[in-house]
Image (cartoon, rainbow, N blue to C red):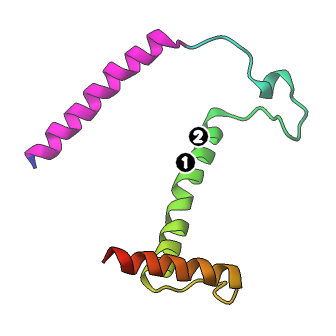
């Protein structure tokens, strides 16, 4: 348990040290974003900050369960929904041959 708190302290300390370094080197600027300068209501739309971060969170958190389940089916069960596809069948054959050479 102590190692958890030590690692957490290192992570928090690194966040502040590295964050300060990045802020000094790159620094925030006052440029106008494309959503403001080229707003057309279709491709470039000004959005509230909370919605932008929510979209980023859903994009990151939403792919984990999809790709995780795919990896379980393909690697563990050796099943793929397009297994009848000849190109995929060849790739699975090569993958299984390489996998058997490792063990």
In the rendered image, residue 69, in percent from the top left (x then y), is placed at 50, 74
Extreme-bottom residue of the structure = 84
**Residues at circles 2 and 1 in contact by the CB criterion of under 8 Å:** yes
**Tag 2 secondary structure:** helix
Q: Residue at x 50, y 61 (%)?
A: 64
Magenta span includes 26: yes
Q: Is residue 7 above or below residue 95?
A: above
- Quadrant in which residue 31 is drawn: top right
In the rendered image, residue 61, in percent from the top left (x then y), is placed at 51, 55
At label 2, counting other C-alpha atoms closer than 10 Å, the crowd grade (few under 14, some 14-19, many 20 or more) is few
In the rendered image, residue 96, in percent from the top left (x then y), is placed at 47, 81
Q: CA distance from mark 2 to mark 1?
A: 6 Å
Camera-side residue of 12 and 48: 12
At label 1, counting other C-alpha atoms closer than 10 Å, the crowd grade (few under 14, some 14-19, many 20 or more) is few
Q: Which mark is residue 53?
A: 2
**Tag 1 secondary structure:** helix
The majority secondary structure of the magenta stretch comes to helix
Q: Is residue 86 left or right of residue 97?
A: right
Q: Residue at x 56, y 60 (%)?
A: 63
Residues rendered magenta in the picture: 2-27
Question: Where is the C terminus found, in terms of image quarters?
Answer: bottom left
Q: Which mark is residue 75?
A: none
Q: Residue at x 74, y 17 (%)?
A: 32
């Amino acid at each position: 348990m102590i190692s958890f708190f030590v690692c957490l302290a290192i992570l928090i300390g690194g966040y502040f040290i590295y964050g300060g370094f990045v802020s000094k080197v790159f620094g925030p600027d006052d440029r106008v974003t494309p959503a403001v300068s080229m707003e057309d209501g279709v491709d470039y739309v000004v959005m509230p900050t909370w919605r932008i971060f929510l979209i980023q969170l859903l994009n990151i958190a939403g792919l984990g369960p999809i790709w995780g389940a795919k990896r379980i089916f393909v690697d563990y069960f050796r099943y793929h929904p397009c297994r009848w596809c000849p190109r995929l069948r060849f790739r699975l054959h090569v993958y299984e041959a390489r996998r058997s050479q490792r063990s």
